[in-house]
Image (spheres, rainbow, N blue to C red):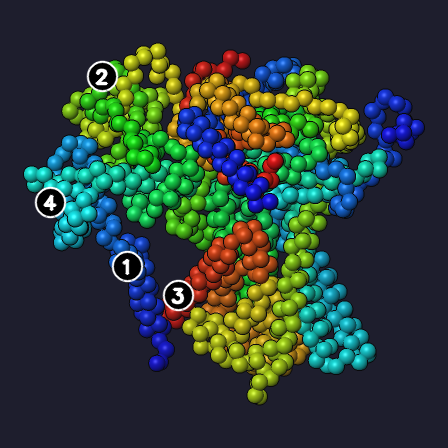
Amino acid sequence: MIYNPITALLVFLAGSLLCFFVFRPKNGIYTLLKNSYQQKGKTILEDVLKFLYHNQEASNSITTNDLTNSLNFSSTLIIDSINKMMESELIFLEKDTYKLTAKGNEYALQIIRAHRLWEKYLSEKTGFHKEEWHERAEKKEHELDTSEINKLAILLGNPKFDPHGDPIPTNSGRIAKKAGIPLSSFEVNCIGKIIHIEDEPKIIYNQILAENIHIYSTIRVIENNKKRVVFHSEGEVFVLPPIVAGNITISVLENSNVNEDNIARLSSLKLNETASIIGLSKECRGENRRRLLDLGFVKNSKVQIDLLNPLGEPKAYLIKGTTIALRKEQASKILIKNNGKQGE
Amino acid sequence: MEKLRKMNRKRINRIISLSEELRWKIGDDFHDNLTESIYADASKIVEDSVTYTNKKSRFRLDVNIDKIVTSKIWGFPIMLFILGVVLWLTIIGANYPSGLLSELLLDITHPILKNFGESVGLPWWLNGFLFDGVYLAVAWVIAVMLPPMAIFFPLFTLLEDFGYLPRVAFNMDTMFKKSGAHGKQALTMTMGFGCNAAGVIATRIIDSPRERLIAIITNNFSLCNGRWPTQILLATIFIGAVVPESYSSFVSLSAVIGIAVLGIFFMFFFSWALSKTMLKGEVSTFNLELPPYRRPVFWKTIYTSLIDRTLIVLWRAIVFAAPAGAVIWLISNIDVGNESIASWIIHALDGFGFLLGLNGVILLAYIVAIPANEIVIPTILMLTIMVTGISGGEGAGVMFELDSFNAMGDILKEGGWTLLTAVNVMLFSLLHNPCSTTIYTIYKETRSVKWTVVASVLPVIVGLIVTFLVAQIWRILL
Amino acid sequence: MESKANNTCDNCIHFNVGELKKLGIKTANFDFVVALAGNPNTGKSTVFNALTGLRQHTGNWPGKTVTRAEGAFEYQQQKFKLIDLPGTYSLLSTSNDEEVARNFILFGKPTVTVIVVDASRLERNLNLVLQILEITSSAVLCLNLMDEAGRNNIKIDTRTLSKDLGIPVIPTVARSQNGIPELIQTISELANGKIKCKRYNIKNIPNNIEKSVQVLSEEIEKEYPNISNSRWIAFRLLEGDTQIIEALENGEIA
């Protein structure tokens, strides 16, 4: 072949395109091949069980159509799987709707346990972004066997809740009941605590993430109508459309001695103001949380801004006699009581 | 014995299951509570025994220095000024001792050794292998590497001991955060301009696993002092010659700086790419303590930084350079058929080299010079003379350089070099695998074959792609 | 002991220079192991160098010594091996440095642990000190950087501090060797059992946790009567430290 720079470039481009199509992470030929070799049957079966379980909890009745429409597999595969499950007595049919047998219920809880434990693991021990936890757990839940799940639980200290606030079933299949009401139907001026943030559908979840709303934070609703829900939390004001607010669950705090108005985030502290730390938000997890505690960001510590940054971030804070620089997302997870301007 | 172990097991299992039960009861706040209690104790103890006679929370002078070095107006100019002074002192200051050393080790000692070898009756091949191969490579590395490192590291260490460097990390963090890295990477990167192996060791100051790996893998994009001379030489001979003489030194200097800046650009780009792909699952934390300023103990600092950084890195480089020198000598002196091994390899690589806008000599020089970038140019000169058969040089397997840039340029042009070759060698010198000292250091620091391979292969692939693209586009346009 | 009585006055704790030999890195055949722990950036490595005559590099940077450094010195014919542990803020987390430090103090069982703290930041440094004191009470507090504390107008009542912590407290300025003789003297006296330390237990722990810790540590003591730091092991078990569980299984602790 005679060399020509244009041919060489074209060959190179063709090669790169080919590599791209084979190895791209989503819908790449390599990934598709890898997935098709994995046992699809188990995944479908477990997804059907999970789907039935969640709907049973919400008292929805589920027909064959519901299943084929909601699950991301071909109808024939799903129907195949349903028949197999009826045979092995995991589910049964009652007036056109599917119900879980006791055995099926137990199986479903195991899958949910695996899913939520894995999410907890991702949140505590790895650096994956929140956005990814759910998707990764959706895959991993089908890969873990019972002994691995139990080992994971011990490693994490048998946690009771996953990072979204969902209860994790125990290995004997006990599960705490969900309580609380959706934020969208919360009354104005009531005080409550966010106990759950739903991670599905992804579009709404991402909207909640973008707002930096923290789980287990205390809130007070100041406006609630068909157009929007406005609430105070940790010294900030949040505005959400009702459909998004519906995916946040609140438990009512009867005791009104919780003075929500005094809480603020360290990121809102201004130069020359002093504050005392109330604690760390539950959103601050794993190694990050331990690090901040070790550095002295604990209850009752006094804190003030020591240095501003020429580029705005990170700011340096004076805590227990040492200057420590923190990025904004860290400072926003430290809760303080602002004591105002420093008296000279 | 077996029985004892079984008993032991039983007792332990009881304790462990008890602890798990209690853990479940306490919930996941244990760590928080424990730390809070410890700090509560601490503040009680401090109340008992510490008195502050002055309520000022921080030392006045510290506060004032900090206000200036992190101010909006002065922060960055001061930083650039200090960096400029350090690099200038290193490059200018190293010239003289470097020349002296190379005269001593290469021009004076080398012939003496060869004569000595002959006089004690060493066979020519042993004499050549030992003194032309091994000795020359080691001497070259010392002459080029030692002076800049002996200037750069103590200066850097003085700044470090004073406490200024954490402020640089503080100022720069936003820029690094955008590419998923830690502000302290600004310092390990700067350290890399001295020596990549030292830069990799310096990443210990980054205590977040993900950001530390990023800093290690991308450190090679900092142009180290083994590569600066190559850049300066080629820029002067080839790029400076393109423009009128009055501009030539300015243009060649800009070209060298341009390459270094390009390296920084690649560093940012790959930091970002790694943090979004391969490394996104690694734990990422941030903490940056700004310690009080302390007056450095001047002579002690100079001494320890010489011992700790300069000599250790130099020692490793020598250990790796010696075998490289041996290999270079051997492949140029062992014939297979009617040609030396080196010639065979060069001919085999010529086609691929042409595709990249390079040639077989350059590729072979980079392969055998993996241990030390310092010997790339001498090896290229030696091999060029060997293949073209022009007169000059010191003989097969004997690396050399000439005093005049022009004379070296003539040899290279004789070897078929064009402006494109020079530009691509400059690019490839920036974008190729780290030297073996650095590879070994990366392995020692990460204890992981995977990350060592990634850090070694990634820049080479980038280099191949970049030189290939430049060559094709150059040929299409010109 | 007699030779000491002959050489110096009986009671004075003045240090006898003639009896100190800095042995650098010759660490063979030692009588005692001394661990050097402390927060990052407290001049720990400077103390290490002052004791051993070595010149390990110390940067004004948190976290310079990552690997363990070893050195030795000889005092009154006894050889002390000194281990410089990585500087950490705490022993409770999972980072590599902390593991090295934690494991050495717990499993390496040093005769004496020297805890170096920054006198001008005592409160934050006490976090680590109190954790170490839960593991071992054979420790001495080296109150370093006293000159900086002085410049910041901080006064420390070392007697009260020593009483509160139950261990000897030695103020030093390691850069200029101030207080190092007294520190060596104290290390030697601790190693030879001439000074007795009092055990320190963390106090302000919430009731429900304190109860769990007590239950668990009593169980541990029942099974392993020789264990002196059952409370610390209880802490670690409640944190789910897998290394401790392994160590119990291998019998490394008992």
Q: How crowded is mark 1: few (under 14 residues within 10 Å), some or many (20 or more)?
A: few
Which label lies toward us, 3 or 1?
1
Q: Residue at x 77, y 39 (%)?
A: C31
Q: How would you rate the neighbour count of disc 4 (Cα within 10 Å): few for under 14, some for 14-19, many for 20 or more?
A: some
Task: Determine which residue is flagged by label 2.
Answer: A188
Q: Residues within 10 Å of mark 3 (few under 14, many from 20)?
A: some
Rendered residue at 49%/52% (across/down): B218
Depth check, front residue: A242 or C96: C96
The image quadrant of residue B22 is top left
Which amino acid type is marked by label 2? Answer: Val
Chain at numbered mark 4: A
Residue sitting at the far top: A257
Q: Picture quarter containing residue A180? A: top left
Residue position for label 1: A37
Chain holding disc 3 = B
**Residue depth check, mark 2 versus mark 4: number of the one nearer the observer:** 4
- Disc 2 and disc 4 on one polypeptide chain: yes
What's the CA distance linking mark 2 and mark 3? 64 Å
- Residue B372 placement (x, y as % from top left): 60, 63
Q: From mark 2 to mark 1, how far is it between C-alphas? A: 54 Å
Image check: B391 left or right of A157? right
Q: What residue type is labelled 4?
A: Thr
Compare marks 2 and 1 and give the one earlier in the sequence: 1
Which dot marks residue B469?
Answer: 3
Helix or strand or loop: what does disc 3 sit on? helix
> Upstream in the sequence, badge 1 or badge 4?
1
* Same chain letter for marks 1 and 4: yes
Q: Residue at point 35% right, 14% down?
A: A258
Residue A132 in sight here: no
**Are the residues tagged 2 and 3 within 8 Å (C-beta)?**
no
